[in-house]
Amino acid sequence: MRTVKHILKGKPAVVYAVSSNNSVLDALQLMMEKNISALLVIEENELLGIFTERDYARKIILQGKSSKNTPIYEAMTSNPYTISPNESIDNCMELMTSKHFRHLPVVEDGSVIGIISIGDLVKFIIEDQKQTINQLESYING
C-alpha cells in the first residue's frame, strides 16, 4: 500500500511555519519567497493552524483587513486536519476531496514532520500509474 511516507521521501524535509503573532504580510512574503501556497502556524512545537492563499482571500482581502496589521492567528484555519505518515494515499485523496482543502499537515508522535498538497498527491498517483503501465507493457512485450 502506498502511503504518505512515499510522498514525503520525494520532498525536501523542511516545513515552513510562522508563529501566531507574525503578521499576515510576513506570512505572505515567506510564501512568495518559497513559492508555496500554505504555511503552518506552529508554536513551541505545537501545530496551531494553517494559513493558505484561500484564507488570505476570504479572511483578509474580502474583509477589508490590512495584511500588515493583522496577526496570522486572525486569518489562519485553527486545528487543521492532520494525517500520519502511514496514511494511505487513497485516504488522503478522499479526505482532501470531501473536505475541500488542498493541504494536509503530516504529524508523527505529536510533531509536524511535513505537509502534503493535492498537487503532491496527483503527481505521485500519475508517477505510480506510469510505472504500472511501463511494467505491464514490458510484461506484454516480453
Image (cartoon, rainbow, N blue to C red):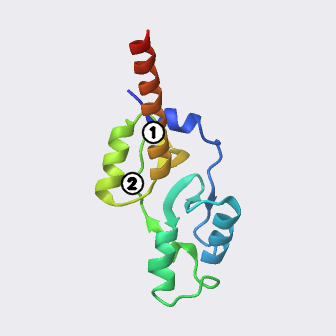
Q: Amino acid at mark 2?
A: Tyr
Based on the displayed image, in which of its 4 quarters is residue 42 positioned?
A: bottom right
Q: Position of residue 78 (x, y in %)?
A: 43, 65
Q: Is residue 117 visible?
A: no
Disc 1 or disc 2, which is closer to the eye? 1
Front residue of 86 and 57: 57
Along the viewing direction, whichever of 136 and 141 lies nearer the viewer: 141
Q: Which class describes the residues within 10 Å of circle 1: few (<14), some (14-19), or many (20+)?
A: few
User: Which residue does the numbered mark 1 point to in the structure image?
Assistant: 126
> Residue 68 vs residue 107: left or right?
right
Circle 1 SS class:
helix
Measured from the top left, where is residue 132 in percent x and y?
A: 42, 25
Q: Quadrant of residue 87?
A: top left
- Residue lying at the far top of the rendered structure: 142
Instruction: Count up the numbered dots.
Output: 2
- The answer to which of marks 1 and 2 sits earlier in the sequence is 2
Q: Is residue 107 above or below residue 96?
A: above
- Residue at figure coordinates x 48%, y 51% from the top left: 119
Q: What number is the disc on residue 81? A: 2
- Horizontal side of residue 35 vs 78, given as left or right: right
Q: In the image, is residue 53 above or below residue 141?
A: below
The amino acid at mark 1 is: Ile
The image's mark for residue 34 is none
| The N terminus, quarter of image | top left
Residue drawn at 50 percent across, 46 percent down: 120
Task: Determine the secondary structure under disc 2.
Answer: loop
In the rendering, at what x and y percent does residue 101 appear?
A: 39, 59
Q: State left or right for residue 70 relative to residue 85.
A: right
Q: Residue at x 51, y 56 (%)?
A: 47
